[in-house]
Amino acid sequence: MDKKEKKCRNQRLPVILLFVCFIIVPFSSATAFEKEFGVILKVLKQTESVKPLECVEIACSSPGILVVTDAKGRIYFRSEVDHLVNVRIGGAVGTHTACLYDRKGKLLDKVTFRVGVETSINDGGKISDMFRLFHDGMLVYNPSGVEQVTWNGKTYSYFVNWVLDNNNTMKGMQYFSPLGSGLIDLLRETQQPNGMIWSFVNKGDDDSHYFNTAYSPINFFRKDKDTWFVRQPVENHVEYNYVNMMYLHWKASGDNNWMKKTLDCAARALDYSVTDSVRWSKRFRLLKRPYCIDSWDFQVDDEYTPKAPISPTMVIVPGKTKFGVFFGDNTGYVEACNQLAEMMDSAGQTDRGTIYRQRAKEIQERLIALSWNGNFFTHFIDEDSHVKRNLGVDEKSQIAQGNMYSINRGLPHDMNVAIIKTYLGLREHLPVGSPGEWYSIYPPFEKGFGNHNSKWQYMNGGVAGHAAGELARGAYENGYENYASGILYRIDKLGRENGNRVWFSFTGSIPASSPEPHYKPLNISMQVNMDLLDQGSKEAFSWMNGTRSGNDMRGLPTGNQIFKGIPFNVIDPATNNRKAVIAVSTLSGFVDKAEIAVQDTAATVYLLHTSSDNIPGHVAGAITFQYIDGTKSSSYLIKGTDVTNWWFPSLENEHAGVAWWGPNLCSTKVGVCWAAIQNPSPSKKIDKLIFHAPLEGGIYAVLGITLSDRPHYVKPKVESYGGPDNWAASNAMAALVEGLAGVKNTGLAYERVKLSPRWASAGVDSVDVNVCFPASNGYVAYRYKHDPKNSNILMKLTGSGNNMDMHVLLPDHVKTVKSVMVNGLPVSSVQSLTEKSRYVDFSIDLPAIQYIIIKYE
């Protein structure tokens, strides 16, 4: 032990040196000190705020007994001193007081200093970088991570304006922001008489007219001046998420008065879920909803979905909508009932708490009997047994992301393990190019969900970055720590490789290339009416009807050509009476449309085309698919998107670009474009294609048409789309803090803590951890060092609370613990197993700084 550590420790307690104190300021004599300062006590090198486990240096001009208390007035340091002492900081943050007494107990002097803390996790390497990525990911939309709305003259702050999103974002943001009550308070004040909670709040006109029109007839829209509220009709997760938010803020803030004020609102909300006819299944006696993907608000669009006037995939039609049980609504509701029961017990309302605890037990039992298949929960079970859906997938095989959330909702350990093993098994059989096994749903639906949920994207087979942290957090708690740490490392790697962000969703499958399509160039020789050159003929316009000699497309190769991998047949005008191009225009002498017989199916129509440079508008032309069954589908061809003019062409996107360019006698660059036009009905046989002229004037020209039996392949981006990315980063942060760092709040505001450092699972031997609830300034701080050479784990820790239950993960190879020493004294400990993971368990008291040595073999 060096001199600095001797000065820093409590003189009565042995100490282990883990970290270096502040630099000691030289001190010559008490007389010099008195002369300089004119006082007995002085905090040297005092900064605005000292962090827990750092040292402050206190000089005294007279020997005595120094007592240091934390912001709660609790003593954490007491020692005889003479001249100079280093005090390591512990206890509650705020104003700390150092008092010097003589040996008779008379107060000689006292000084105060500030102690503050912010959440941080630092190993000087990968974990530090991971922490920053997750932290910054929670602030991707604004630097504070907070939004605001004003209602009834009061401003409310929250992280996301949707209840579901805000609840999940709170899981990470609670460690960095005190603003956890805003949305809870607002929705308490606006709760409907039947107990319903709004799904989200917004301000300004924005989309309010749509929601007003669609939802007002079923009483799911409300507007008060500039602020409006919406309940997504199909959602049955709002009420339990509301209680989750309330519970999170109560636990972080320790504010019992606030909690008691919100209890009745929470109870009415949970009662609404089991009494309202569109929320409660009388048949199954479980929460119900229309068929959606997991907990999302897009209802399936199939033969059982009633066609509402607006948004059939969102709206419930009484008497016609088909309902069923989604398991995640019920596991979430069970957790919320237990949370409400705990809050009621704390408020002295144990009789009420018993009601909700019993309700949770009964719903969980019924859900398991109905939905549990032995490995995971079945995604959805229709109330009406006559409903037989055709969604292109074996629905009973589908693994929905709600399983990852459910392992943190109080299920029995064996069920949690079964779910974790399901994802471990899925990881061994991932689709091509999959970034991970954390699917929103797998396998995805082939039918029933539109473009908003395209296959392998967002909720239909996207890899849920927002759920990966939940799986990791649950794996840490259930004996799969190495798997959990691997998930965090993989999330971190994905984020760093794709824009330094934890994306809400990643593309679920990314093949390196698509299967080779079958191409079929069409014969357009009967419809062409324009030359490639400046010549023309009686039957053909000169190129773009121009008169300038040499200003044409003479360099374009003809015959069978391949441009950008697509085969086209470009007609040689010399062999076809100077006719090589279909030109449509409203200009004099031109036809304003041209029809090409097809008599075939196609997934994609590839065009070799261009546009004159004198079209004043943005529309270059249009294309119509006319099918054998008489139906039609048309779309515009947009300049700058699908095609561009032929002089100095410049176009490049995923579906179109410059196919060929070269010089003519008047310009160094002329050219034509390619474009992939998706057939809206690829299963229908196409009778003909109709090309339309631009109404504003100018010429639209087609030089080649090729059919393909496959959709145009564009390699998807790794990141997908959908919900807010701060949600994903927050759940990852929660797994890092509560799972890997192991700081779990088992009381209020860290008054009691279960500390389960699991750094052995991440290959981390040295790390500094500070975890704080800004809503209360409750915190835990510890320094962890694994010394494999000497077979021990060293820890130094403190916190704002009173007790700490230690549950320390041992390295995989450890057979047994030889001893646990706290402040140099042996303490009673037990070893426990969670699956195959070995922990050592013991308890310590706070606020005194505790120095721990765990020796193993």
Image (cartoon, rainbow, N blue to C red):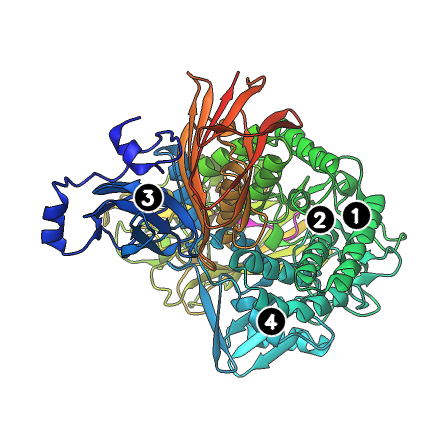
Res 167 quadrant in image: bottom right
Cα separation, mark 3 vs mark 1, equals 54 Å
Give the residue at mark 1.
390
Residue 150, horizontal then vertical, whole percent: 48, 77
**Of the two numbered discs 2 and 3 in the rendering, the one whose residue sits closer to the viewer:** 2
Q: Count neighbours of disc 3 (C-alpha within 10 A) and say few if under 14, some if 14 to 19, many if 20 or more.
A: some
636 vs 212: above or below: above
Cα separation, mark 3 vs mark 4, equals 70 Å
Q: For numbered disc 1, what is the local secondary structure?
A: loop
Q: For numbered disc 4, what is the local secondary structure?
A: helix
Tell me where the magenta segment starts and ends, as one range: 673-685
The amino acid pointed to by label 4 is: Leu
Give the residue at mark 2.
447
Give the residue at mark 4.
187
Q: Are marks 1 and 4 in contact (CB under 8 Å)?
A: no
Give the residue at mark 3.
554
834 vs 376: above or below: above
